[in-house]
Amino acid sequence: MTSYPKPQKTLILGATSAIAQETAKLLAQHHHHLFLIARDPQKLAIVAQDLQVRGASQIHTATFDLNQFEHHDALFTQVTTQLQGIDIVLIAHGSLPDQHACEQDYSTAEAALRTNFLSTLSLLTKLANYMQNQGHGCLAVISSVAGDRARQSNYIYGTAKGALNLYLQGLRNRLHRNHICVLTIKPGFVDTPMTQHFKKGLLWAQPQQIAHGIVQAIEKRKDIVYLPWFWQIIMLVIKTIPEPIFKRLKL
């Protein structure tokens, strides 16, 4: 009798985002056992049905606002009870705040930081300890190239992603000895509903491209991945601009 490997158990938070959906499609084709979490129940149901057709071995869903930190414990219990082990986590939860509004009102800036950094920190605290105890797994988190250097056009968002990048760096250092991959995903410009009001150009990528890069990076157990790849070169150049010059640029 032929022995087949067990399906990977994968948790996706922010599962209805464009990048998460495209990544989930690729994982479904490899028959992953998926647990999907998102805020919109109707959209989540449509995504789940599509993934079932594409080959997912099993699918669980939960409608949840990940900014409700006080309920993270209950959500974590539900996930671990139903999955009975987690091999891969993809955190695709986030928002693109209005920079001007954040500049004018602290509560708006704080909400942006809660969504794009603190909520992920809360989730990863539970997930990291769980994977450390089970002795294997991959924590893949979507950050942004915006976290590499703050610019006047989006420095509140960049601050959140920069803090997230540092947190993931420390977490990776901590969990390496436990054979756990901590992957920082740094997309550049991506054509999604979140960026629909932006003018698109040559540097813009489609969610499908980013999804393929994410899956490859998980399979290769990478530490950090820029998507598309050329953003690593772009950000290297931006990071090396001296501050006296950089502060005069309109970016």
Image (cartoon, rainbow, N blue to C red):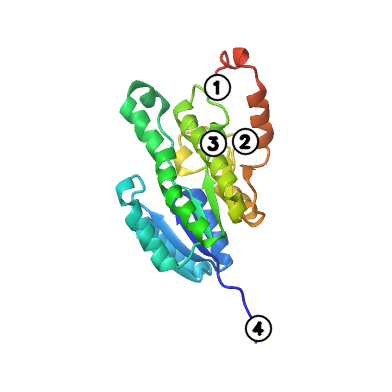
Indicate the quadrant where residue 109 lies: top left
**What amino acid is labelled 2 in the image?**
Leu
Within 10 Å of the Cα at label 4, are there few (<14), some (14-19), or many (20+) other Cα atoms?
few
Q: What residue sits right under mark 3 in the picture? A: 166
Between 198 and 57, the one nearer to me in the picture: 57
Residue 53 x/y as whole percent? 49, 69
Could you tell me which quadrant the C terminus lies in? Answer: top right
Between 134 and 197, the one nearer to me in the picture: 134
Q: Nearer the viewer, mark 4 or mark 3?
A: 3
Is tag 1's residue or tag 4's residue first in the polypeptide sequence?
A: 4
Asked if residue 73 lies left or right of residue 125, the reply is left
Residue 87 x/y as whole percent? 53, 61
> Which numbered tag is attached to residue 2?
4
The answer to whether the residues at label 4 and label 3 have Cβ atoms under 8 Å apart is no
The answer to whether the residues at label 3 and label 1 have Cβ atoms under 8 Å apart is no
Asked if residue 33 lies left or right of residue 77, the reply is right
Is tag 4's residue or tag 3's residue first in the polypeptide sequence?
A: 4
> Which numbered tag is attached to residue 251?
1
> Which numbered tag is attached to residue 19?
none
Disc 1 from disc 4: Cα separation: 58 Å
Indicate the quadrant where residue 45 lies: bottom left
Asked if residue 154 lies left or right of residue 175, the reply is left
Within 10 Å of the Cα at label 3, are there few (<14), some (14-19), or many (20+) other Cα atoms?
few
Q: What residue sits right under mark 2 in the picture? A: 203
Asked if residue 130 lies left or right of residue 110, the reply is right
Q: Nearer the viewer, mark 1 or mark 2?
A: 1
Residue 46 x/y as whole percent? 40, 61
**What amino acid is labelled 4 in the image?**
Thr
Disc 4 from disc 3: Cα separation: 45 Å
